[in-house]
Image: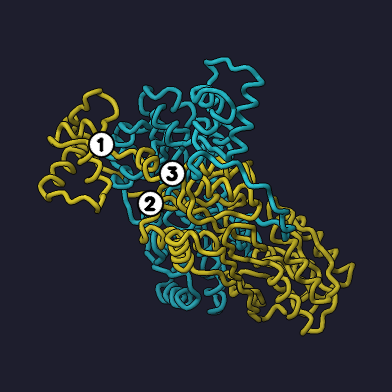
Chain colours: A cyan, B yellow
Amino acid sequence: MVQIPKQQPAQQPSAPKAPAKQSARGAVPTSADVARLAGVSRATVSYVLNNTSAVRISEPTRRRVHEAAKELGYVPHAAARSLRAGHTRIVLMPTPEVPAGPLYSGFLNELQWALSRLDYTVVQYGSVGVGGDDAARAWAELRPVAVLAPVGMGPDGIAVLKRSGAKAVITLGPAPVEDAHALLMDHREVGRVAAEHLLARGHRRIGVVMPREEGLDAFAEPRLAGVRATGADAVPLPLAYEEEDAAQVASRISELGLGAVFAYNDEYAMLLMRAVQDAGCAVPGDVAVIGADDLMLGRLLRPRLSTVRIDLPSGRELAELVDRLVRDPAAEPEVRDVMGATLVRREST
Amino acid sequence: MVQIPKQQPAQQPSAPKAPAKQSARGAVPTSADVARLAGVSRATVSYVLNNTSAVRISEPTRRRVHEAAKELGYVPHAAARSLRAGHTRIVLMPTPEVPAGPLYSGFLNELQWALSRLDYTVVQYGSVGVGGDDAARAWAELRPVAVLAPVGMGPDGIAVLKRSGAKAVITLGPAPVEDAHALLMDHREVGRVAAEHLLARGHRRIGVVMPREEGLDAFAEPRLAGVRATGADAVPLPLAYEEEDAAQVASRISELGLGAVFAYNDEYAMLLMRAVQDAGCAVPGDVAVIGADDLMLGRLLRPRLSTVRIDLPSGRELAELVDRLVRDPAAEPEVRDVMGATLVRREST
């Protein structure tokens, strides 16, 4: 699915507009310009536009200020507001370094929607190439009120963020980090569930696909560890997401006499199943195959693909957690296990 | 593929650290604290940490300032810097409202990497529920230096952004918008290429899948229009991404005697092909099927799926364009066609 920012049908050319009233400097309009146009003080402009509930301003005055601001195209400077408050309403999280799959993209969308309903703004900050504690320094400049930090952010980075005003720092990963709340996501569970199923089907030697693609070893290594933790004999099978490499791995599976493969996820599973079938072998008759993620494609393959469904907190649950931790920043760091892995047994194993 | 922010293997608990030197106020350290610790003026601190090349500062002084800043955990306030400069190094773009497919996610990643190499920061701003010109007001608060805006942002929103200091506003969509540069992406081309191919294969009546899923009509409608523009008799086929709905559409294709379907994209094509085959019909013998996006799965299906490959500018090309437009903001608005659509003929048509 090609996803381009949302489009609309071709627009009608707009009629020429009357030129907007110029600000005094002819450049970026300021609150002083708005005050002048509305006939009020700068303080009043600030109270009205920042919706300061502590100060009562009459309706007609509010209207005059809003109209003047609109006429001049004045926008309150987030910087000015955040300098006064010390922080913003920004919830910061890193853009994933690897292209996000359908599960994570959907999750992110839900999270942003839920946070915006609680009057936060989610900003995905591109920190490509800037890791851990260096990223913290860059993020702190934006004065976020909350940060969802990947593991790799250590206690130093967390301290920088808190000192810059962040009320809640929440890490996402397999282990907690000092001084931050933690949502534990341990991918060993995925490997364990897949391997337990294959063991129950009588397979003691299990091929484990290890994607060659950049950035995926952070997930593949724990999954392999999870397979090993069951006591199964795990045989790593490096595999690039390409037909030629899949054909070679299918040969290797044959040569090694492997009767079962945990294919890392459903997409690699589909690739490998096709290679195995093209080589004349049957699934599950010659090779049992299990994936992960429970994508739609798994139901459409023949044989239907067994998989591991991964359960994450809903975006809404996570948004409510963020909000609670922002309101109560002195709370003891919380650690909770949020990733569930459940077997979905179909026809391929 | 479940994509969670990058993880590392379980960390060792860290040793207790010596407490950082307190700032004078015991709270967020300021440039005054750094100046005091380094024995320099605040102006010097600012010159050093903002890397102001216009002022020559000796190496030892620079070092003292950096060390003092590090010891205090001082982070220059992006807000303060942007207030002075009037803008930031931020390139702002909306988070896609629909979960991004593999093509767009990869493109975004590449764009961010290329922009960060040019010393920009890409910020994906969650403007869920805030459309067009309202989004502009929210974005302007961050004082971005460049904005990649979806169509839906009209001339008013663009004016707000420019007045707040944006040097380049670039829209992405099927038609140009007054006062902004435009990268034209016209999805009618995708429908046209698919339909031309089916017409060449002798089919005058073409089923056109219209996904029921939220947000996709922005792409599906132009694609349908592109099919119609070839003179083919287009029959819209609303389809949800679910097996049951696909089975119903497969029946409908039979009843209508449709011999060819443009299935919107490869994922819907795979779903529909399976439903058609499960109903006992042959692809392409009874129904020719073509998708779009040229995903890997198309090569793995049997018959292999014909598709339309969509060519977009590389992230690197787009980054260089953004940089050029930021450096030369007075340039005439540029309009360029950046989306190519190419037939990839396989076995399913």
Quarter of the picture holding the N terminus of chain A: bottom right
Q: Which residue is label 2 attached to?
A: A127
Residue sitting nearer the eye, A266 or B83: B83
| Residue picked out by circle 1 | B74
Q: Is residue A61 depicted above or below A320 in this figure?
A: above
Q: On what subunit does the disc labeled 3 rest?
A: A
Q: CA distance from mark 3 to mark 1?
A: 21 Å
Would you identify the image quadrant in which residue B197 lies? Answer: bottom right
State the CA–CA distance, disc 3 to disc 2: 10 Å
Answer left or right for B139 relative to B243: left
State the image coordinates of residue A120 (x, y, percent, origin top left): 52, 34
Q: Nearer the viewer, residue B137 or A172?
A: B137
Circles 3 and 1: CB distance less than 8 Å?
Answer: no
**Residue A301 occupies which quadrant of the picture?**
bottom right
- Does residue A301 appear left or right of residue B91 in this picture? right
Residue picked out by circle 3: A93
Label 2 packing within 10 angstroms: few (<14), some (14-19), many (20+): many
Q: Is residue B335 visible to the viewer in this orientation of the structure?
A: yes
User: In this view of the protein, can residue A284 be seen by the observer?
Assistant: no
Q: Amino acid at mark 3?
A: Met
* Vertical side of B60 occupied by A220: above or below: below
Q: Earlier in the sequence, mark 3 or mark 2?
A: 3
